[in-house]
Amino acid sequence: MLRHILSLLALIPAAAHAETLYVRAGRLVDPEAGKVLAAQVLKIEDGRVVAVQGEGPLPAGAKVVDWSGFTVLPGLIDCHVHLADVEQSNNVAEPLLHSAMEIGFIGARNAKKTLLAGFTSVHDVGSFRAYADVELRNAINRGDVPGPRVSAVGAYVTIPGGGGEVTGFSPDVTVPADMRAGVVTDAADTTRKVNALFQNGADSIKLIATGAVLAQGTEPGQIELSGEMMKAAVEVARQRGSWVTAHAHGAAGIKLAIQSGVKAIEHASLIDDEGIALAKAKGVWLDMDIYNGDFIAEVGRRDGWPTDMLRKNDETTEAQREGFRKAVKAGVKLSYGTDAGVFPHGANARQFKYMVRYGMTPMQAIQSATTVAADLLGWSKDVGALSPGHWADMIAVAGDPLRDVSVLENVAHVMKGGEVVK
């Protein structure tokens, strides 16, 4: 029950907007219909869109936001961010150098950057300190700090020493207990820990099914969670009306996670043709961060990141992009997920041009970050579109993203719940 209440709160704007507001859009991208409309006016009441119509006379004294010189889109959605944590660095022990209180302030800063970049909703898929993402979500919902609507997972569900652990330091170092809240050893332990995550406010669950690129001592192709452990997590989530996403790089781990009942796969770097067909058949989303590899290769080498991380990145980057291209052709559901936190928060839109480069049309890329992402989160009635009934979450950009999708990297204006925040 608590999870449902908190999830609903995530869709409530920070402040009530009883007045009526009109937004003039020079061009309006409609991802539901897959088309662009010229000279539209959106009528907003109590933070939600109530009507969309062609340009015409407005009531005397109407409050108007004039974006007639811009292209207007629904607020963007990133389904793979890490707001409440430090950004990736060359120090594997970096997460241990910051207090829980400091992580709270870091999360608030990252949330604001993300919102101002035009991402008005996110799936925060974990921080090393348990429930930091949950508390950040709650702070945003209360209006304490500005930020996007957040769906939070609470903590990584991972094996001891696995891809969701802080690794790479001396074995006699004791990791704080709140960094190991999701560490599990068998199916029964998984059931207990996943229940605890929901009881403490998680909206959904994040499994670390395979090893990771950016965790020392793990390999991307290696299965870490057993099928029994993943099924246990999926069953707890089902009982609570929720769902599970799985970090999975290796082909075997991806297929095992899908067969275990997860709703989405993150990364899917080494997915094979059988895995793509299975995702298509099961209706599973792939959340593939195909920009990330270039950032890691450039900045990681420049800043001296551990050599095994750079090696694993080299082994997965191009394979992931080829898998993405095949998944697009196969018609698999592909949500927009970037792994922001590896690269700086606020730069989330850099991935759009990569998605177009590797097989999507600009409209498909926009849909991945609007309607498709909203469907994954279970929020389709509230976000991801601007038809009547949706929250008035929208952005305005100069230029035409259907001609050059990279214009989404420079958002001029942002509105969340009928309130202009940029």
Image (cartoon, grey):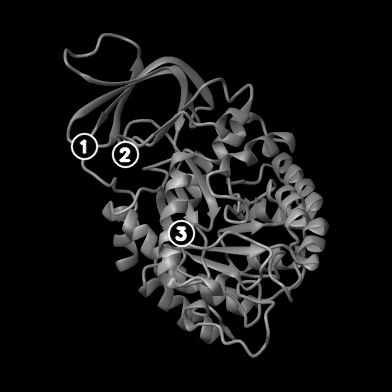
Q: Sequence order check: which comes first, mark 1 or mark 2?
A: 1
Q: In which quarter of the image is residue 361?
A: top right
Disc 3 marks a residue whose amino acid type is Ile
376 horizontally vs 226: left or right: left
Nearest to viewer (mark 2 / mark 3):
3
Q: Which residue is disc 1 drawn over?
A: 17
Q: Distance between the residues labelled 2 and 3?
A: 24 Å
Give the camera-side residue of 38 and 124.
124
Q: Residues within 10 Å of mark 1 (few under 14, many from 20)?
A: some
Q: Quadrant of residue 183?
A: bottom right
Q: Where is residue 103 in the image (x, y as percent from the top left)?
A: 45, 65
Question: Where the N terminus falls, by quadrant?
Answer: bottom left
Task: Indicate which disc residue 210 carries.
Answer: none
Task: Indicate which disc residue 106 carries.
Answer: 3
> Pointer 2 and pointer 3: residues touching (CB < 8 Å)?
no
Vertical arrangement, residue 89 with respect to residue 402, above or below: below
Vertical arrangement, residue 422 with respect to residue 382, above or below: above
Disc 2 marks a residue whose amino acid type is Gly
Vertical arrangement, residue 402 with respect to residue 146, above or below: above
Give the camera-side residue of 195 and 60.
60
Q: Sequence order check: which comes first, mark 2 or mark 3?
A: 3
Residue shown at the point (73%, 74%) measured from the top left: 218
Disc 1 marks a residue whose amino acid type is His
Q: Distance between the residues labelled 1 and 3?
A: 29 Å
Residue shown at the point (61%, 87%) measured from the top left: 173
Give the camera-side residue of 108 and 65.
108
Question: From this viewpoint, is residue 241 visible?
Answer: no
Q: In which quarter of the image is residue 96?
A: bottom right
Question: From this viewpoint, is residue 383 visible?
Answer: yes
188 horizontally vs 313: left or right: left
Secondary structure of the residue carrying tag 3 is helix
Q: Which residue is disc 2 drawn over?
A: 417
